[in-house]
Structures are given as C-alpha cells and as structure tokens.
Amino acid sequence: MAITSLIPSALARPVTRLAERIANGMITGADLLMRSGLRRMMKGRGLGPVEPGALDELLQDLSRYNDPAILADPDRLLAPPPTRVTLTARAHRRLRGGQASHFTFPSPYRPLHPVYADEFKRYDRLDTVHVHAWEHATPARAAIVLVHGWAVGARRLHELEFSISQLYARLGLDVYFYVHPFHGERTPSSARFGGQLHPSTDLVRTNEAFIQTCQELRTLLTILGERRGNPTGMMGSSLGGYTSALLASIDPRLAFVVPVMAPASLAALMWDHGDHDPMRAAVEAAGMTRERFHHAWALHSPLTYQPKVAWERRLIVGAGGDALVTPRHVDILWDHWQRPRRFTFFGGHILQVGRRAYIRELAQFLGELGLVRG
C-alpha cells in the first residue's frame, strides 16, 4: 500500500503488480537468508544425541518437564515461588505526562535439572531481569507488556518495531518491555551474540529457559498489579509472540493477548525448517521424530493448554509473506484458539513492511475492549 500510494493512478494497476512482485521477492529473500543463517548457527549441534540408546535416555530424562501430571498442572514448574520482589530503578528520563525508566529485579528462577544447574552457574547476567518502562504519572487505563523476538532485545530497536511512542502517547498505555534470558543486556559474556544459547536445539536448556521466562514474566505481572493496578495485557513478536501465547495459556490475569508471527509449536517450526537437512537426517536415524521433538518441548507449547484469556480478548497477527513462521504455522495456533480475531499485515518476518497496520489493528482491538481512549 505504501508503494502504490506514490504511483500515478493511470499506471497504478500494472506497476502495483510489478512492485508487489519485487517487494514480495525481497521479503521472502530476507527471511530465507535469515533461515539459512539460523541453520548455520545450529549446524553441528543436532537435535540431541545421534545414537538411539542415548536419545532414548535423554527423552526419558525430559519427563521431569513433560510428565502428564506436570502438563496437567504447569504451575508446578512455571509459577514463580511465593516471594515478594520489588523493582530497582537504574535510570529515569522525563516524558510528556510521565517518565521512562529502566528497572531491574532479581530473577526468582532456580534451575530444575541438576546438570543444567551447574551449567547455569557459569553464565553471568542471567539472574537479573531487565524491564524498560514508559509510564504515565497516573496509572493508565491499561498496560501492555512487550516481548521481543529471537536474537534481538535492544530497547531502541524495539521502540521502533512496536511503535512504543504511539502505544504510550496516542493509545495512552503504560508500556513495559521485557528482555528474554540470553538476550540483550542478559546475554552471557561467553555467548557470541544474544540468542545464541536460547532457544536452541539443547532440549534441556530450552525447557529450563522457558521456565525461567515464565516465572519472571509472571513475577512482573504481580509487581505491576501491586504497583499500578491497571489491567495488563501482553504482545510479543516471533519468540515473544510464542511466549505471549504461552503466558495466555497459563495465567488468567492477562487482560488481552496479541501474539505476532508466533508459531504454535517451536519444535514443529524447527523440525519443518530442517527438511532435507543432514542434521535432521542424523537425528531421525537415531529415532527422533517430529512428534517426539514436540513432546520434548510440550511444557512450553501453547498447544498443550487451553487459553485462559477470554476468546474476545485474543488477537493473532501474522505476516502474509513470512517464510520463517509461515501462515500455516500461524493457522495452527489460530485453530487451537478457536479462531479468534486475526489480522495479517503485508511483509515478512524480517522486513515487516506493513507493521504499522497491525499497530492500528491493535488500537481498534483495545478500543473495542474499552482499554484505550477513543
């Protein structure tokens, strides 16, 4: 739409089609380049042991995460311990009508797996949670927690991606940006880049890191409820969309949820992108299947649970040209959630050309819920 608005009306139709083909080619190309990079990043790590006996032993060990009793009551692992946590302000700056702040609080998470507990001790920067906030002087009508995607996490980047100035100033929301473990300010010094270590094909670490993420976000919801008291929802993109869908599946306190470009199963997404890959062929020969891989990560898949956010308070957003989290993967979550409100914007996973359109859709969605001013 932005391209065609600059074209004379007499030429609009033929040029539009050409422009769209060129744009779609660039969008798909960027996503495929990113997918190739991610596959190179994973190369050599596999999806676990490549010997059948060792794989079976590992999958049995994962029962501490996916035992039926745990999946029936995920709070046993995904709820934080009942300890009081307060925010520490590291920086403030004035905004019109409020202030922007950088808060931290100690992570409530403690590793479950004894082997991973030793590994976790070697990582720095993981035990402090970072939250960037844009708050009105008086608590807003509603608040939104934003969660970023894989291998990113810089505040300035996501101020643009999520149009935070619009969320704060135009919609009047209190806005909170959460940084995932292993990303941004929380990238361990031993990692080559943010997101290298999570999520990854390390089945144990990925389960543990999602336990950590859920406990931290739910602690944040408790803090915000006590501190501000306004209805709070969540929106995330890519990995953050997956996380938002997961939180909406286990925590009824969310006032709304907006997963953006979110897979319903991270395991299925990785498996599908490994088609015709020697790495996947090796683990398949050892006995790994798409179903076994999904079950290994069932604890953090939204498909494991029924959403606890009301149907009319769910909005699923996808990118029409996304070659990473394809429309087919988004369909799975949409169907599982009983086909709630859905919006598709023009663009891909990397080149989100029409991302402002989904911000407008968000504004309309929240307006209809009475959570933002009209």
Image: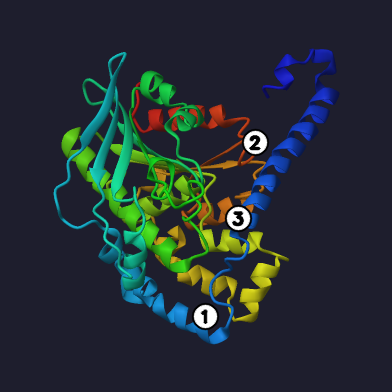
Residue 189 x/y as whole percent: 42, 48
Mark 1 secondary-structure assignment: helix
Residues at marks 1 and 3 touching, judged by CB atoms closer than 8 Å:
no
Residue at (21, 45) in percent of width and height: 222
| Residue 149 percent coordinates (x, y) | 49, 44
Position of residue 360 measured from the top left corner of the image (x, y, whole percent): 50, 27
| Residue 346 in view here | yes
Distance between the alpha carbons at the discs numbered 2 and 1: 39 Å
- The amino acid type of the residue labelled 3 equals Met
Residue type, mark 2 in image: Gly
Q: What residue did someone put label 1 on?
A: 55
Quadrant in the picture for the C terminus: top left
Dot in front, 3 or 2: 3
The crowd level at tag 1 (other Cα within 10 Å; few <14, some 14-19, many 20+) is some
Q: Using the image as rendered, state which of residue 118 and residue 243 is in the foreground.
A: 118
Which residue occupies the extreme bottom position in the image?
53
* Left or right: 304 in relation to 132: right
Neighbour class for label 3 at 10 Å: few (<14), some, many (≥20)? few
Q: In this view, does 17 lie above or below 9?
A: below
Q: Earlier in the sequence, mark 2 or mark 1?
A: 1
Please name which of the two marks, 1 or 3, marks the residue nearer to the observer: 3
**In the displayed structure image, the side of residue 332 where residue 281 appears, left or right:** right
Residue denoted by label 3: 41
Q: How crowded is mark 2: few (under 14 residues within 10 Å), some or many (20 or more)?
A: many
Q: Nearer the viewer, mark 2 or mark 1?
A: 1
Query: How far, Cα to Cα, is label 1 from label 3?
Result: 22 Å
Residue position marked by numbered label 2 in the rendering: 347
Residue in the image at 84% along x and 14% along y = 10
Residue at position x 27%, y 57% from top?
109
